[in-house]
Image (cartoon, rainbow, N blue to C red):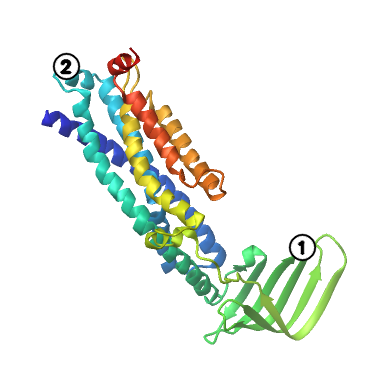
Amino acid sequence: MRILQRYFFREMALNFLGVTAALAAILFIYQIGAVLQRAAQYQYPRTLVLRLFALGAAENFSLLLPLGLLLGIVLALGRMYSESEMTAAQACGFGRARAWWPVIVLTLPVAALSAWLNLQLAPQAAARRAALTAEAVRAGLAVPFEAGRFRSLDGGRTVVYARAADAAGELQRVFIKQGQGDAVVAIVAQRALRQVGADGLSQTIVLFDGERLEGVPGSLRYRVLRFAELRVPLAAPVLAARRERLDERSTQRLIGSRDVHDRAELQWRWGYPVMVLVAAACAMRLGRLRPRQGRYARVWAAVLLFAVYGNLVTAARIWFEHGTTPSLLGLWWVHALFVAGTLAFAWPRGWRRRARA
């Protein structure tokens, strides 16, 4: 029987790794798109972009483990039932109780990994990512203007172009376009210097020998100003002092706290390892197929179950933080509900009939 258990474990583990890798690829593509968008907007240095992406991946990877395990086990059981491998194994005396051992051996390390990711790694990654984002914004603003290239600032509302630049940082033949509602301001100058404030965020361009043109496109009313020297402040993102987010706080700081938001965050983190265990139990029930059912017949049910589970936990957190649900229940009543439902469906039919009698 150990040969069959090893075979079952291998099939479930391979499907779990394949599904989790596919989900991780989708998540990483979405995250790298968001990071690149902000990097292009705030001119992040290239060396910090990959670090931000890696920290975001480490912060969110634990979200994939319950769904990956649920779909992996359902897919493995679906193939074995559809190809009559499970029927042949049961005919050889391989009962359902023995089929649980490969699931337990696979689930416990995944649950331990989920606990480590949520309780230790994810808070550290979130805190580091927030600090690195502020550092990237400051470093991006300090990048000098490149000759012959347009530089976008303030979310694209300000565009700066210089035809040439010398080693001292002086710009030659400068063009600046700024949008102010319907009006557009265009400035041209023979030369310019950029000055960065002591805070590293505020910037000013000092223009020499040029013209400033302001008006509404399509109208015939314009205001032209010729100047010998003009100072143009450039809008920059202001990194004001912000409060530490809950997901950045270490688990040790959350333990023992009486604040309802801290308690909700702590239960939220512990909920993911519990979701891994519940997902494995639900997968064993969903993976059973009747004769002539396709191998993917229960995949939609698994996805729907996980969607309901995840959204209900999210709603329970909001209710708990707003005082709608009692403090004693917290978020645990959702997990208890799914555990009870799984046990009810997994209970052998013969035992259920005896209990009714």
Q: Position of residue 91 (x, y in %)?
A: 16, 16
Task: Report x, y in % for residue 29.
Answer: 44, 50
Callout 2: 10 Å neighbours few (<14), some, many (20+)? few
Nearer-the-camera pick, 339 or 157: 339
Q: Where the N terminus falls, by quadrant?
A: top left
Q: Name the residue under label 2.
A: 91
Q: Which residue is farthest top? A: 357
Report if the CB atoms under discs 2 and 1 are less than 8 Å apart. Answer: no
Amino acid type at circle 1 is Gly
Task: Determine which residue is flagged by label 1.
Answer: 181
The answer to whether 86 appears left or right of 324 in the picture is left
Q: Is residue 75 left or right of residue 259?
A: left
Residue 101 position, x and y percent, is 20, 33
Dot 1 falls on a residue whose secondary structure is loop
Left/right of residue 180 with respect to residue 152 in the rendered view: right
User: Which of the 4 image quarters holds residue 198?
Assistant: bottom right
Drawn side of residue 3 relative to residue 124, left or right = left
Q: Nearer the viewer, residue 13 or 354?
A: 354
